[in-house]
Image (spheres, grey):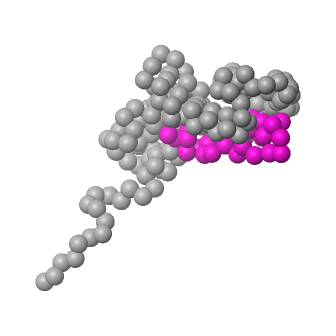
Amino acid sequence: MATTASARPPGRPRAGLNDAVFAATLSTVQELGYARATVERIAAAAGVAKSTVYRRWPSKGELIVDCLLDALGPAPLEGPDRAVLMSSAVRWIAGKIGEPGVGDAFAGVFSDAVSDPALREILSTRFQDPYRRALQDALGDSEPRVLFFIDVVVGALLHRMGMTGEPMSDADLTALIDMVLPHFTDGSAPG
């Protein structure tokens, strides 16, 4: 009797595992809040063992960072000029932060990173740096100015979400853009 080798490796199929875990992460964070959204609860919501999650993400912080990268995707950095490009970037990140679970996860992992240098390094290198470099390339601006732009915009958006539990209103978002853009589109040399 001839046997044929299976093309599939042994064990349960893993196709879609990241999608299931990321969806469970955001829904658990939205439902329970960041602090109570443990890896154990996220794994249960995803229908996988917590060991499965820990094999891919050694910590909750690393899971959240990858989940946020997945939820945000690439920043749409296009426009006929700096003002349009920057305005659309602000509206894009505001929209993403307003999605269920995303703002809570974002604020929670930032808060944890304050007292966790290893998480702060992961957050900086794996999350912030790719967006900073893309924005820096799109604007042709210096790293300090782009970081300041990110700090002001994301800081204001997360503060609003943290203080009210709601994303910034469209009128306030327009006011934020109107306040920030003159500093970055004034024609002065990038510094």
**Residue 80 counted in the magenta span:** yes
Q: Residue at x 59, y 27 (%)?
A: 107
Q: Position of residue 67 (x, y in %)?
A: 52, 41
Q: Position of residue 69 (x, y in %)?
A: 55, 41
- Residue in the foreground of this view, choosing between 75 and 183: 183
> Where, by quadrant of the figure, is residue 105 drawn?
top right
Q: Residue at x 68, y 27 (%)?
A: 142
Q: Position of residue 115 (x, y in %)?
A: 47, 16
> Where, by quadrant of the figure, is residue 155 drawn?
top right
Number of numbered markers: 0
Work out which quarter of the rendered image holds the C terminus and state it: top right
Most distant residue in the front direction: 189
Q: Residue at x 50, y 45 (%)?
A: 22
> Where, by quadrant of the figure, is residue 171 drawn?
top right
Q: Residue at x 75, y 46 (%)?
A: 78
Would residue 31 be seen by someone viewing this image from the given angle?
no
**Residue 119 vs residue 139: left or right?**
left
Give the residues drawn in magenta, as a range: 65-90
